[in-house]
Image (cartoon, coloured by chain):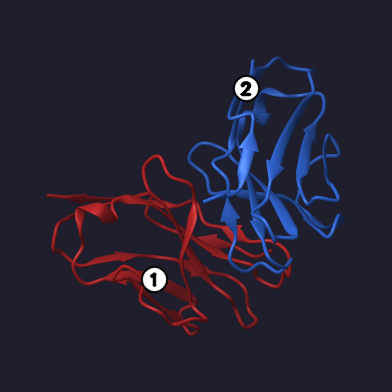
């Protein structure tokens, strides 16, 4: 079964520091991968997807098939980046997403 | 803007009771998915409906059922509630049925006593 692993439940950094949220997946085919974010008192929303190769709010994520990883990175964290981040993938499914357990990022002033 | 709306936002039930949760997708979206989120976990897939047909079902017992109406709104029904059904139930809509960008509602928080 498809698994998405986020090894860190909590991550705390200072404003201006680099941040990396880790995500590993188990699907052996060509993966689609997403990062979703939930800010305080807001609904879960898409941050970025690997297929678009965009940088959103300064965040990027590179798919590394060799390491089966899709880590989310930002060179200079801001306080407004504090949120819960979820990595997700459909695996081989064409109708569902499998989510990781999430990482709570706190950016301290 | 008119995002995905869910009702009720909070509800409390007792074991053995039945619950119906409702979801209205974004206008123009034909697919609705339901996810269960238990505290400390990521959302877990329950159902997806596209054009009123069930396209997929997650690893949930038959006590869970859903349907989609001609206006693309959806209901999730859970019978014979157990304490372990306490969770946030999220509805998400998308334009097509694929597992692409999902637009989530704020969820219905179910507490089973």
Q: Chain of mark 2?
A: B
Q: Compared to B13, does A7 lie above or below?
A: below
Apparent side of residue A88 relative to residue A18 in the rendered image (left or right): right
Label 2: how many residues lie within 10 Å, few (<14), some (14-19) or many (20+)? few
Q: Quadrant of residue B83?
A: top right
Q: Quadrant of the C terminus of chain B?
A: top right
Is there CB contact under 8 Å for labels 2 and 1?
no
Residue nearer the viewer, B21 or B26: B26
Q: Residue at x 63, y 79 (%)?
A: A28
Task: Name the residue beneath numbered marker 1.
Answer: A71
Apparent side of residue A18 relative to residue A34 in the rendered image (left or right): left
Q: Compared to B80, does B51 lie above or below?
A: below
Q: Name the secondary structure under disc 1.
A: strand
Q: Compared to A10, does B78 lie above or below?
A: above
Apparent side of residue B68 relative to residue B96 in the rendered image (left or right): right
Residue A24 image position (x, y, % from top left): 48, 68
Q: Chain of mark 1?
A: A
Label 1: how many residues lie within 10 Å, few (<14), some (14-19) or many (20+)? some
Marks 2 and 1 belong to one chain: no
Residue nearer the viewer, A90 or B66: B66
* Chain A, chosen colour in render: red
Residue A37 image position (x, y, % from top left): 43, 56
* Chain B, chosen colour in render: blue
Q: Which mark is residue B11?
A: 2
């Amino acid at each position: 079964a498809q698994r998405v692993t986020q090894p860190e439940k909590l991550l705390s950094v200072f404003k201006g520091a680099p941040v990396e949220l880790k995500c590993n997946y188990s699907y052996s085919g060509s993966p689609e991968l997403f990062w979703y974010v939930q800010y305080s008192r807001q609904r879960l929303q898409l941050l970025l997807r690997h297929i678009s190769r965009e940088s959103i709010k300064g965040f990027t994520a590179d798919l590394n098939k060799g390491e089966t990883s899709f880590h989310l990175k930002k060179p200079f964290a801001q306080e407004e980046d504090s949120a819960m981040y979820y990595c997700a993938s459909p695996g081989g499914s064409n109708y569902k997403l499998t989510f990781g357990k999430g990482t709570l990022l706190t950016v301290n002033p | 803007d008119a995002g995905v709306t869910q009702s009720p936002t909070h509800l409390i039930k007792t074991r053995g009771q039945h619950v119906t949760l409702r979801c209205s997708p974004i206008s123009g979206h034909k697919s609705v998915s339901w996810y269960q989120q238990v505290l400390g976990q990521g959302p877990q897939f329950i159902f997806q409906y596209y054009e009123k047909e069930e396209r997929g079902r997650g690893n949930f017992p038959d006590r869970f059922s859903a349907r989609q109406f001609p206006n693309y709104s959806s209901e999730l029904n859970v019978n014979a509630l157990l304490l372990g059904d306490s969770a946030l139930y999220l509805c998400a809509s998308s334009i097509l049925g694929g597992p692409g960008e999902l637009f989530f509602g704020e969820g219905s928080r179910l507490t089973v006593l």
